[in-house]
Amino acid sequence: MVTLPAGVLDRFPRFTRYNSPYPAHDAGTAVDLYPEEPVAPSPVAGRVVETKTVTCPSRPYAADHDYLIVVETGENLARMLHVEPAVAPGDEVAVGDPLGPLVRSGYFAPWVDNHVHLGFRDRSANAIRATGSLPLAIDVPIEPVRWDGTGTVVETRDTFAILDAPAHPAPGTAFAGIADDTGDFVLDGGLPHYEWGGRLAADPARRADSDGSESRPVEFLGQTVGYATSEPVRWSALTVLANGDPVHGLSLFFGRDVLYAKLIERDHDFAVGEDVVVTIEA
C-alpha cells in the first residue's frame, strides 16, 4: 500500500480516484491530479529513470500520442501519464518541480479535463506495463456535502454543463465532495457512465476497514446506485435525469477550492441560468 499525503494533494485544486474507465482506477491503484497551471508539478520526489512516448486513440479533440514518466522514489516506482516530459532519465525532481506541459490525450473522453495520472509499482516491477500498480490510499480528510439534486447552470461546454450547487463549505481550506445519503461517505467517479466508482469515508482512519468484506448498498438521491465492500463501488443499472430528461451521467470529484455538480451529455441544450433538478431512476 502506498499512501499519498495531504502535503502532495494540497498542491492540486481537484483530484479523483475512480472517475475513469481504466482498470487501475477500478482497482483503487491510481489517482488523477488536476493542476491549476498547464505545466504539471511533480507529485513525487526522486530520480527519473525512464520516459516514453506511447500511441493512443486518435480523437478530433485530443492528441494521438501520450507520455509516460517513471520516477524512482526510493521505495517505489511512480508512474505518471499525460505529461510531455521536460525531464530526462537521471534528473532529480522534488515535489512541486515542473515535469512538463499537460497533454490532452486520446485516452480522454471529451468531457475530461487535463490531469496527471499517478500510480506506483514495486521497484523490481515492469513500469511500462499498464497493469500491476500497488494499492493506493489518500491520507487527507474530505468534507462530505449533502446535495438535494437542484442547481442552476453556470457554465456549458459541448459535452457537459456545470451547476452552481452544491457549494463548497470552506473554499481553500479543505477538500470536499458530494456525499451519499448517509452523509458519512463522499462519492467519486462517473455515475453511471463508468462501470465502477468510489466511496471514501470522510475520515481517513475509517477508509481501510469501512465495511470489511460485506457488500452493502450505496444510496444517493434516494436511490440505491451501487454496492460497495470498501472504497470501490460497482454502479447499478440506472439513469441520471436532468429536469426529467436522461443524460449520460454525473461527474463526481474532490475539490479544494470549489465544488459543483457536472452533468455529462453530448450535444445537450442546457443554457446558463437554467434551473435544473437532477434525479436518478434505478
Image (cartoon, helix red, strand yellow):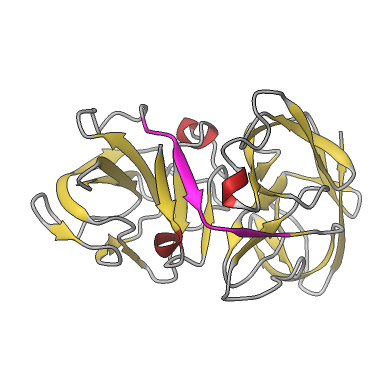
- Residue 274 versus residue 102: which sits nearer the camera? 102
Q: Is residue 39 left or right of residue 148?
A: left
Q: Nearer the viewer, residue 156 or 262?
A: 262
Left or right of 84, for residue 150: right
User: Would you say residue 136 sits in the magenta stretch?
Assistant: yes
Q: x and y percent of residue 229 in the render?
A: 66, 29
Which quarter shows the N terminus? top left
Side of 35 where 175 appears, left or right:
right
| Residue range of the region highlighted in magenta in the rendering | 133-144
Residue 241, given in percent of the width and then of the height, sits at 84, 47
Residue 143 in magenta stretch: yes
Nearest the eye: 18 or 73: 73
Write the residue at 58% across / 74% down.
Answer: 173
Residue sitting at x 79%, y 52%: 183
Which quadrant holds the C terminus? Answer: top right
Residue 105 seen in the current view: no
Farthest top residue in view: 214
Rendering quarter of residue 175: bottom right
Total numbered labels: 0
Residue at image coords 11%, 57%: 91
Residue at the extreme front of the image, as rendered: 205
Identity of the residue drawn at 65% across and 28% down: 212
Residue 219, image quadrant: top right
What is the x, y in percent for residue 215?
A: 72, 25
Image vertical order of residue 191 relative to residue 146, above or below: above
**From this viewpoint, is residue 56 visible?**
yes
Residue 163 in picture, x, y percent from top left: 75, 66
Q: Report the residue that reaches farthest toward the left.
A: 90
Q: Is residue 17 shown left or right of residue 130?
A: right
